[in-house]
Amino acid sequence: MAGIISRLFSKNSHETRLAPAKTTKIIVCAFDPKFSVLVQEDSAAYLNHYPHTNTVIFSNADEFEKELEKHFDVVHLFCDVDETGAIEGTNYSGSGLIRRCYVAGVTLLWIASENDANGYINGFHPEGRPINLVMTINRKGAAFQAFLSELLAKMATGKSMPRAWVEIAPQTTSAPIQEELPETIFSAGFGQLRLL
């Protein structure tokens, strides 16, 4: 399912674009403490390859705004998205969140909590901003951790995100649906993003 859904939203890019040559900074965070266990689980996957990974549970959007000033490359966020695409408990729309992350220099925004696809489709629009965006529909339990760990392992060797993604979840129409993969929407707006 990850392959089919991501195929609908992926952007073909013939250019190779790299994140700046520096140590990748990552924040795994949430707008609600109910996601604390998942925040710790996902941050552990990042820490295996990216030592500059921070975890934060925010009380409000103002705290999130202040944290973005630290210039993270990756924002891996847990939040509830309503059917219009608004982020519950904040004043953000999905598009507003994307815009704010882009302005802060984020190259990958990953919504890691499960939300209905309609909320993403209705409210998360990159509007031409070059940012990679992953939106999770169904983590499928341990399947999410396995997928994230494999993806990060490939990327840590220098492989671009879209290339690593299609190795795990082939994007051809003849590829079988892989039930062991989480269901996601992947938009590769940044192109061949590498996290070093």
Image: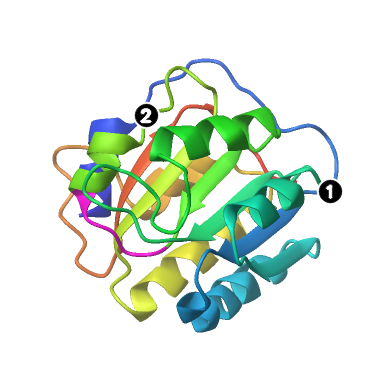
Q: Residue at x 46, y 73 (%)?
A: 145
Q: Residue at x 59, y 34 (%)?
A: 100
Residue 116 located within the stretch drawn in magenta: yes
Q: Is residue 74 above or below residue 171?
A: below
Where is residue 92 drawn, in percent x and y?
A: 46, 42
Q: Residue at x 68, y 58 (%)?
A: 27
Q: Quadrant of the N terminus?
A: bottom left
- In the image, 12 versus 26, the foreground residue is 26
Instruction: Give the label, 2 or 1, closer to the camera.
Output: 2
Residue 75: assigned label: none
Task: Report whether 74 appears left or right of 98.
Answer: right
Label 2 neighbourhood size at 10 Å, few (<14), some (14-19), many (20+)?
A: some
Q: Which residue is mark 2?
A: 125
- Please identify the dominant SS of the magenta region: loop
- In the image, 116 versus 9, the foreground residue is 116
Give the magenta range: 113-117
Q: Is residue 167 above or below residue 129?
A: below
Q: Earlier in the sequence, mark 2 or mark 1?
A: 1
- In the image, 57 versus 3, the foreground residue is 57
Amino acid, disc 2: His
Residue 138 visible in this rendered orientation of the protein: yes
Q: Which residue is mark 1?
A: 23
The total number of labels drawn is 2
Q: Quadrant of residue 190?
A: top right
Amino acid, disc 1: Thr
Task: Report whether 80 appears left or right of 39.
Answer: left
